Image (cartoon, helix red, strand yellow):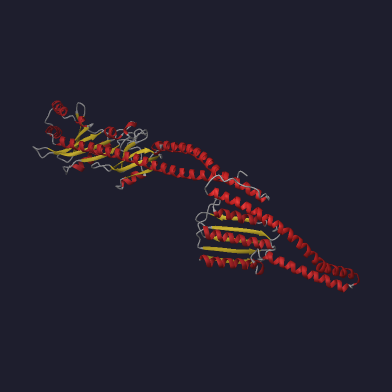
Amino acid sequence: MLKNSIIRKLMILFFLVGVSSLSVIGIYSYFNAKTAILNRTLDQLTSIKVIKNEQIRSFFQERFNNLLFFVNDNRIKAIFLDLYNYSYKQSLPKLLYHDFHLKKLNKTDFRLYGFNNMFFLIKGHKNEMKIFKTGDSTINEFNEDAVTLSLLKNMFDSTQNTNKPYIIDFTKRHATDTMPVCLIGMRLNCDESELSGILVLQIPISAVNNIMLEDNRENGLGNSGEIYLVGKDYLMRSNSRFIKNSVLNTKVQTTSVLNAFKDKIGRALIDDYRTISVLSSYSKADIKGLNWVIIAEIDYEEAMIPISSIRNDILFLSLLICILLFSLAHIISRTISQPVIRLKKAAQSIGEGKFDENVTVSSNDEIGMLTDTFNKMSAQLKVEKEQRMIALYDGQELERQRISRELHDGLGQKMVALKLAMESTNKQNEEKVRETIEEAKINFAKAIDELRQISNNLAPNILYESGLDIALKNLCTSLSRTTNLYIDFSTHGELEADHPKAKFYIYRIAQEALTNAIKHSEANKIEVQLIGNKDSLILIVEDNGKGFIPENKNSEAGNGMFNMKERAALLNGTFVVETEQGFGTTIRIKIPRKNSDK
């Protein structure tokens, strides 16, 4: 009773309307806030990336300016000239050489400008090259490691015929090197001679890391944000916040890096080099002579923390509002339904024949008007009932009189005649009795034929008039014509079903299989085969469509498969589906000729 009550229905209606509106507002607010917060986070990453990009660009530009300053410094030129004379003319005593030049170097300490080594590349008369490296208290000829020597020779070849600075990207000197070498160099010309050489300065990786590596959550990157540089070989050029010694050791070939190397500027949600979802902002690093990209990222999970808080607040407020909505819906539904319930009870009383019910009018709205109309109807029904009772009594009396006459004059006389005829059958011969029985058989046969005709109308007549094969052929032809699909039908062997139910069910299975193939397979060719042997009937429906996942039972096609399987089971048959996504579907039904009526 409660399940179908108007109070329950009104409560559910009001509650669903309120909850639906609340859900729409809540979902809109959540996704709007989510979009705004994610965009704000990406904007913040982009701003920090731009700042870091400018800082690293300025750092390298300052190093180039320092190099230009040293190349034009007369003290450096004097050191270079003395080194040349010392190397090729042996004109200065060694002790004097050390004292003299170290005093000059102390006045131009390259370390104050952010370099950790200075090299002099000097070309001799026979095109041989000598390399000198400045130490803490000495200037010595350099031959420490092959990688640095190779880089210096590359620097010499790249700068000896130009007056432009040249930079060599960070390179590891050995597999476990944690201090890779980055060199900038420029041709040095002595004013008083035609001598020239190359001045090379080494930039420490620590200087780059000091700019790029941020480990303070107050800087706008939180607990998981980082900004790093990546070279063209997809190896890091600055340390990761999460991996120690990652320079030239950690490979980063993410979507952001690939897009940045395509000169794209953008931001996206990607999986980073740790396979963690992050918000990423990327672009090319604006550093002269270096093909680097700069990436700013923060974990998606951390970026979602304020969004999750907003979601929880929305859910909590929604729960409170739902409770309030439920209470209001209950009050409003009872206010609306009480007059209707009173009308219902009065209508039930009238249905039981109690026409004295009168409902009190308690409002001036439509329900009040309905109540007043109901009271008038009740009074009118009471009057009509009394009139019907009077007419009924009068009619009954008249009917009794008519029936009495019919029984006496009509049926009574016929019954008497029948009684006399039945009494006379004892005197009839066998031939007369046989004629009577034959007439009864004919009448019964006609009744049976009529009943069979009604039964046959419930199933396709062509199944019983022309057979299963003709019915299936007509079905395929009709579907092919209406869908413009190529549907081929072929038969083999003895095709007549032993039982009408088998014929009907096989037809319905074929109909269901063709319908599924047309609706869901996206096929352009369907083949239907009906094969009969002495033991069974086999139906095969094969298409060249897209196939499907048999375990998916929630789709419309899945329900059709279940129906076909059930029909086959009712005939003690088997139902097999062979399908794979992209390779079509084949359905095989095998129905035994015997015991097919379960």
Q: Nearer the viewer, residue 215 or 168?
A: 215
Q: Quadrant of the C terminus?
A: bottom right
Image location (x, y in percent) of residue 427: 91, 71
- Total residue callouts: 0
Q: Going by the image, does 47 lie left or right of 138?
A: right
Q: Nearer the viewer, residue 423 or 466?
A: 423
Q: Going by the image, does 315 lie left or right of 350?
A: left
Q: Nearer the viewer, residue 538 or 270?
A: 270
Q: Going by the image, does 35 lie left or right of 4?
A: left
Q: Going by the image, does 108 lie left or right of 31?
A: left
Q: Residue furthest left?
A: 192
Residue 334 in view of the camera: yes
Image location (x, y in percent) of residue 8: 57, 44
Residue 8 in view of the camera: no
Q: Quadrant of the N terminus?
A: top right
Position of residue 517 relative to residue 215, above or below, is below
Residue drawn at 52 percent across, 63 percent down: 525
Residue drawn at 80 percent across, 69 percent down: 440
**Residue 335 occupies quadrant:** top right
Image location (x, y in percent) of residue 557: 55, 55
Q: Nearer the viewer, residue 313 or 108?
A: 313
Image location (x, y in percent) of residue 103: 14, 26
Position of residue 244 relative to residue 564, above or below, is above
